[in-house]
Amino acid sequence: MERVCQFLKDAGTYYLATAEGDQPRVRPFGTAHIFEGRLYIQTGRSKPVSKQLAANPKAELCAFKDGKWLRVSCELVEDDRVEARKSMLDAYPELRAMYDENDGNTQVLYMKDATAVFSSFTAPPETVKF
């Protein structure tokens, strides 16, 4: 899990895919944070991605850096504790211009039943589960 988190941070931007009915939706994300042994991402409740994950928590994300890529399939589970939201925002202080752990909009979700596959054109894929 730590290696997955570091790859996402090093890539800077990764792409999160969700489903809206039968239509896939993909958008850029940039948060990855480990809190209490779980890998979290962050969004806003007012965004369509939040509503999509509430209807179907299955998601996939993909990141690419230096000829290597990472794909993670998981279920994203909301953690509604203020401590989890605060930890994320403390790790990404630049988000505090838009979010606060007590604003009712900040949402953090952790990866459950995750399968991460590290790939490149020059090495066999490596799978990690957490």
Image (cartoon, grey):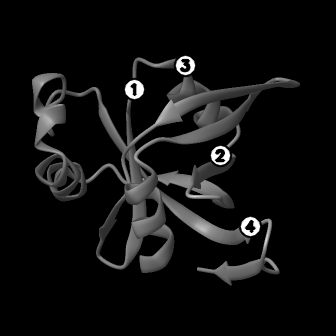
Tell me the distance, in whole angstroms, between the alpha carbons under discs 2 and 3.
Answer: 13 Å
Numbered label attached to residue 57: 2
| Neighbourhood count class around disc 4 (C-alpha, 10 Å): few under 14, some 14–19, many 20 upward | some
Q: Is residue 126 above or below residue 73?
A: below
Q: Using the rendered view, name the quadrant where residue 127 is placed.
A: bottom right
Q: Nearer the viewer, residue 68 or 102?
A: 68
Which residue does the numbered mark 4 point to in the structure image? 120
Numbered label attached to residue 48: 3
Q: Mark 4: which amino acid? A: Ser
Q: Mark 3: which amino acid? A: Pro
- Residue 1 visible in this rendered orientation of the protein: no
Q: Left or right of 48: which side holds 99?
A: left
Q: Locate residue 23, reporting x and y percent.
A: 83, 22
Which residue does the numbered mark 1 point to in the structure image? 45
Q: Residue at x 18, y 22 (%)?
A: 98
Q: Is residue 46 above or below residue 61?
A: above
Q: Using the rendered view, name the quadrant where residue 81 is placed.
A: bottom left
| Sequence-earlier tag: 3 or 4 | 3
